[in-house]
Image (tube, rainbow, N blue to C red):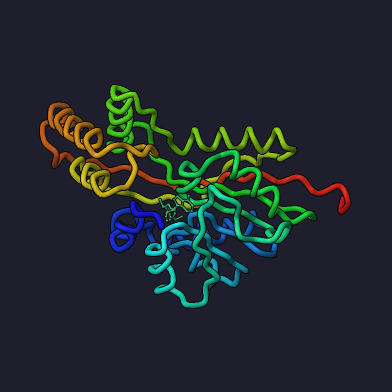
Amino acid sequence: MNAAFDAQAGSFDRRAGLPAAAVEQIVSALREVCPDGLLLELGAGTGEIGSALIAAGARYTGLDLSLDMLGVFHGRTGRAALLQADADRPWPLRSGIARAVFASRAAHLFTPERLVDETLRVAHPAGAVFVLGRVRREGDSLRAILRRQMRRLLAGHGVAGRGGEEARSLLFSAFAARGGDPLPPRTAASWPVLERVADSLASWRSKPDLAGADVLPEVRHDVLERLAAWAEQTWGTLDFTREATESYELAAVRLPVSEETS
Ligand SMILES: C[S@@+](CC[C@H](N)C(=O)[O-])C[C@H]1O[C@@H](n2cnc3c(N)ncnc32)[C@H](O)[C@@H]1O
């Protein structure tokens, strides 16, 4: 079980759901990047993307530690092959079966060494890809500014946050060192958002981690209180709003083909 994600399974899509049109575009971009065959999704969550992949005809298996997140996924489509398992332990899958291993908004939560070892183990010997998906925000968006300040506050408590960019660069270097070939990242979808300071603060209050780090409740409370005070001082009110654009980026690594099949 994964207590933190179990607790937010019912509200995850409301807090962090992607626009339906974006999900469709992400699915077609994924189908272009991934060879035909089994696609394994790590941290599949509530199945927003996974269920759309299945509807589009993909051969799909989703793995997640949180039974409650998987319960929401199952409610979306009873047809999904779902595994409740910890991505930080050996994966309950045969070697060489996956043509694609995909992680959306989750890779920063996993241990990189295990992720790389297990991806290479389950990768099909005739060729496979590892694909990382994440939401990107403009550097001057309210959420990005707040996040940078949150990381400063976390650093004051000796906590180093880890975001999507750090996870990507670490993983891709590790795959490259094992013969992987990183492909240029591509934007699969983008959409307009109306950002409000109070909404970002509320969403972090209901999230299990802060900037990808597990933090003690008292640290979390202190950081979020100080962040709210800083935001009020900076923008005059927590109701401050601004338009911005969010996008969903896919970055892939072509995994090495095994000697016997090349
Ligand atoms: C931020 S959610 C992303 C869900 C989905 N991929 C998406 O983009 O909507 C992260 C997911 O990773 C799962 N997760 C976190 N740690 C995990 C672990 N060690 N093993 C497997 N799943 C894990 C959580 O339960 C959660 O469903």
Q: Work out whether residue 147 or residue 138 is closer to the camera in this orientation and state it.
A: 147
Tell me: residue 71, above or below residue 117.
below
Please tell me which residue lies in front, 232 or 159: 159
Above or below, comparing residue 167 to residue 66 in the picture: above
Q: Which percent across, then down, holds residue 245?
A: 36, 44
Q: Position of residue 98 (x, y in %)?
A: 68, 59
Q: Point out the residue furthest to the left here.
A: 236
Horizontal side of residue 8 vs 230, given as left or right: right
The front one of 223 and 200 is 223
Q: Is residue 172 left or right of residue 5?
A: right
* Residue 244: image location, x then y, percent: 32, 42
| Quarter of the picture holding the N terminus | bottom left
Quarter occupied by residue 28: bottom right
| Among the 4 quarters of the image, the one containing residue 32 | bottom right
Q: Is residue 157 left or right of residue 222?
A: right
Q: Residue placed at 37% from the left, 59% from the top?
A: 19
Residue depicted at 20% across the width and 40% down the height: 197
Q: Does residue 253 lie above or below 22 as drawn?
A: above
